[in-house]
Image: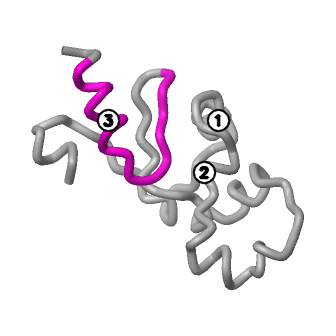
Amino acid sequence: MFFKERRISYHLVNLAEKPMSKGELQSVLSAVPAENLLDTESKAYKSQNLQYMKFDVVSKLLENPALFKTPIIRNGKKATAGFEPDTWKKWLEESA
């Protein structure tokens, strides 16, 4: 909605239909720590009882795209995970 209201073109990727590739994930990880990509409030996280386990976050994210915090927004080498309108506004100001 943030981008639509500001008439900014965007590309929506449905992670359930097309999981993120390992290379794409590595690109996002250069800007966002793996722990920040994990949605600890998601049904997938809770149903797997991941809050009680130690695991490799990157492997889990690649195995189960439902664990990603969304939306994942990329802006060149920058990225965010989750609803971050303040960061997106800052990006817009920097590009103006």
Residues at marks 1 and 2 touching, judged by CB atoms closer than 8 Å: yes
Residue type, label 3: Trp
- Specify the farthest residue to the front: 86
Tag in front: 3 or 1: 3
Residue indicated by mark 2:
37
Q: Is residue 37 magenta?
A: no
11, 44: nearer the viewer: 44
Give coordinates of residue 9: x percent, y percent: 20, 36
- Crowding at dot 1, Cα within 10 Å, few <14 / some 14-19 / many 20+, comes out as some
Residue type, label 2: Leu
Q: Which residues are magenta?
A: 77-93
* Res. 86 mark: none
Identify the image's colour scheme: rainbow, by chain, secondary structure or one colour.
one colour
Estimate the spatial distance between the alpha carbons at disc 3 and disc 1, rounded to whole Å.
Answer: 18 Å
Residues at marks 3 and 1 touching, judged by CB atoms closer than 8 Å: no
Task: Kindly state the secondary structure of the residue where label 1 is placed.
Answer: helix
Res 89 → quadrant: top left
38, 65: nearer the viewer: 38
Res 53 → quadrant: bottom right
Q: Is residue 91 magenta?
A: yes
Residue indicated by mark 1:
29
Q: Residue at x 67, y 80 (%)?
A: 46
* Left or right of residue 93: residue 30: right
Task: Kindly state the secondary structure of the residue where label 3 is placed.
Answer: helix
Rendered-image quadrant of the C terminus: top left
Please report whichever mark, 1 or 2, sits nearer to the chain's N-terminal start. 1
- Crowding at dot 2, Cα within 10 Å, few <14 / some 14-19 / many 20+, comes out as many
Residue type, label 1: Leu
Residue indicated by mark 3:
88
* Left or right of residue 62: residue 31: left
Res 39 → quadrant: bottom right
